[in-house]
Amino acid sequence: MLVPLVLPLWAVGALAQSVGACSNYGTALSNGTCQCPPGFSSSSDCTVATCDNPLVPTQDRQLFSTVLSGNASAGCARQCSDGFDGPNCNVCSSDMACSSALADRNGATSSSSSSSGISLTDGLGEPVCSRSAWSWTEGFASCQVVNPTLQSVFSGATTLTIQKTVDPSQALSNAEGPGGTMTAQLWYAPSSGNTTIVEQFFCAADSCVQSNSTGSAAQTEQVDWTCQNLRCTCIPGTEFCGAPGAPLDLTTTINDLSATLSITCDAATGTECAFKQQTLRTLFGANGLALSGCQWGECVLPSTINSLASSLSGSTTSDGGSNDLSGGVIAGLAVLGGFVVALLILLGLGLVNQRRARRRLRAKEGFPAGAGAAGSAASYEGKDEVPPVHPSSPVGVHFSNLSYILPAGPSSWPLSLLSRAPKQDRTILSSLSASIPGGSFCAVLGPSGSGKTSLVDLLAGARKTGYRAGSIELVRGASQYAGGEAGAPLAVVEKEREAVRIGYVDQHDVLSETSTVREAIAFAAEMKLGEVSRAKKRARVFEVMTQLGLVDIADSYIGTVEGTGRWGISGGERRRVSIALELVAHPSILILDEPTSGLDSTSALRILTSLKALTVATPSRSATTVIVTIHQPSSQLWHKFDDVLVLAQGGGQLYWGKADEVSGWWEGKGVRCPDGWNPADFLLDLATSPPPDFLPLRPSIAPRKFSVVTPLEQPLGDSQLPRRRSSAIPTMLLRNDNLHAGVDRTPQATALTQVEALFLREGKNLIRDRTLLLMHNLVLPLVALFVGGMYYQVNESIGGFQSRVGALFFSGCLVAFASLSALSNFSRAKRLFIRERGRAYYHSLAWLATEVVLDIVPLRLIPTILLSVIV
């Protein structure tokens, strides 16, 4: 008689029949019916929900009716037996309900049950309703799906029912499936119009394992139900699966759900659960479908619980379950750990090397005064030689038939491909010969373009891109001039026993702008004096500052002269600081390129007076050979020089000899210096416009391909010098070759000392030049506050998700563009690095490691962490 009121879901059933013979993964029987999971009618091929309770035989459960159920949006409602709930009445809510349902099924009354229900421990064997998330035989659950993203599309009420089959042989319900399986159904009731609840899709999985574990949130106990071989089917024509007018069709997404399924609930109440699968996690977050208000219910005998609990004793886990670290995280931690271990090993090796070098140097404390700074024992580790020391006698320079040819650059392309004219090289220096005695003060004069800078570059061993011919030798002892006292014969310095320091100060003062004068010189001492004790380094720094008159400005910042940064010392003082950086290492030979350029006469005189003093030996040090290039010295400066080498326009040699013999020698050649003239002005006039008799001295253009360069006539002013000369320039021209065999050009400090000194200097630079540090560590947090405030408490919807993506993108762009400041940092430090690396202050890797760490940590890492924490 209820037939007219039954089957409001026939439409759904008709659609579901197209899925297969039996819906909800029921089993087709030989008699043409279906064996359905609890809560579905076998007479309708498992498409229509049934009510009553799960202990009633499946064929006897009444079908769902919108009239009889009352509130159709809640499922069966009034069609459920007392004490049962859920869309299809599978969830028990009290022990009395289970006892009554079992009694009704057995055809008995429930008069033996007390009004307060049956206790677990009364031993009467009456069934109880287990309402925990842990299932003993066959557990049922009904949960509300609360997901902002899903609710923004489907605004009605969404319910998920779950059936966990653990041990069907001991189940009181009509368990149909095997143990270790799971079925689930998602129900949806629209919020307007026809609000009848309708099944949208169903899922099943097998190979399920139930366990207890400890969750990461406050170490809460949770129940895990993990299954394999998940499969789901979307019921065609429903709201979720392509119904006409539906906002979204999830058919493909639902039908593609597979692989592993995990249902996790808090063990205390079981009300909060998560339906986790990889695709669902991608769509809805780490917890997949978040479930709330879950009601668990399972009618089970107390004896069954006791026996199963005994067998499961000790089988729970506390390893975090699904919260274990992933393989990618483990791999990342392994790489990070390996990097830290490698860094510690390098640090340990650096400490060992540093201490070994200092011990060896302390063992050599007895060598002559002034020699301790010549080099570090670290440069000679593993060798039998003693550490290098300065020779007791000064070191001079002898060069013979020295020529330098600069390859011509390619002409404009593609015209060079059509031209048949041979490419020409340019001769910069042509057959220069001189013997500069040790301990002398030699000036190289000549007009602009005469090759003065190229000559001192070659003497200092700087890298040159051209071709060089001739020989350069370091000599020990004094040479002799005709008519003078015979000195010790020229001797080539033995590279096996002695290492000679050559200091080179080029035209431009490239200094650390944020350092003080004392700090700049101390840094040079730290690098060039190796592992000498700090007290000796400080003493040497003070000695050099005293020699060059820098004590009064020792604590002044160097600054810049262009006005682009901190104002500092004057141009003359900067020049003296540049000289001090080379002088601190006790150089045997000091070469300076235009040391008086751009200075007033007083500053120029003070610098040359300081340089002249270096050529005088003292009890604590040997005399230093000083070679300077100078453009047009005053008569007062001229009388400071011992020897003079004059270069003609184009690189030819015009004169070499004593400075005080210039006028007499030229007068003997028929060219008289006018009375009252400065000899330097006289020589420069001759070098710029020599008389016709001297025109052969002008260099010729030589082709690039040659085997021998024809030597020029013996340079004037050199005929009186009994120096060694080869009959012709060597037939092989060497490119980028250093002929200074005895020169020590390796960094004297150990790697750890280099890094320590660089960190100290660059750290001070970062603090004193506060622009970058403040901008990165203040601006980024301020922008983070702005972004965080703009997106504060964004709701969990699709719009909110898009807002979060926008905030992350904006923050990432901000960090990326802020990192561009590293380009200007390296560009600004490039000139100083090139000068110091060329002078063998440190290894390139030490500088690079320091720059990278001091750029990444305070300017990139810390601001990014602040940005991430705030946002």
Image (cartoon, rainbow, N blue to C red):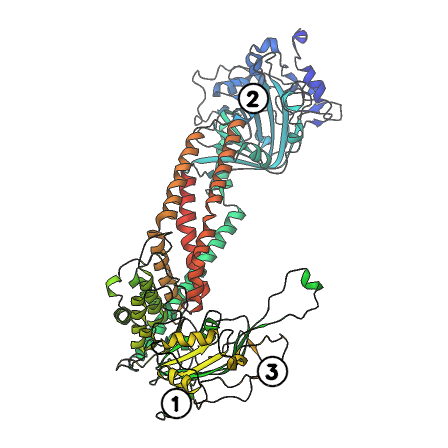
Q: Earlier in the sequence, mark 3 or mark 1?
A: 1
Check disc 3 and give the amino acid type. Answer: Val
**574 or 849, which lies in front?**
574
Chain-order first, disc 2 or disc 1: 2
Residue beneath disc 2: 158
Amino acid found under the numbered disc labelled 1: Tyr
Q: Quadrant of residue 76?
A: top right
Which labelled disc corresponds to residue 708? 3
Q: Disc 2 residue type?
A: Thr
Separation of disc 2 and disc 3 at Cα? 96 Å
**For mark 1, what is the residue?**
481
Q: CA distance from mark 3 to mark 1?
A: 30 Å
Whether residue 385 is visible to the viewer of this picture, yes or no, is: no
Residue 138 appears at what percent x and percent y? 56, 29
Q: Name the secondary structure under disc 2.
A: strand
First in sequence, mark 2 or 3: give its number: 2
* Quadrant the N terminus occupies: top right
Secondary element under disc 3, as helix, strand or loop, is loop
Instruction: Give me the residue at 47% from left, 17% from top.
Output: 113
Say which element carries label 1: loop
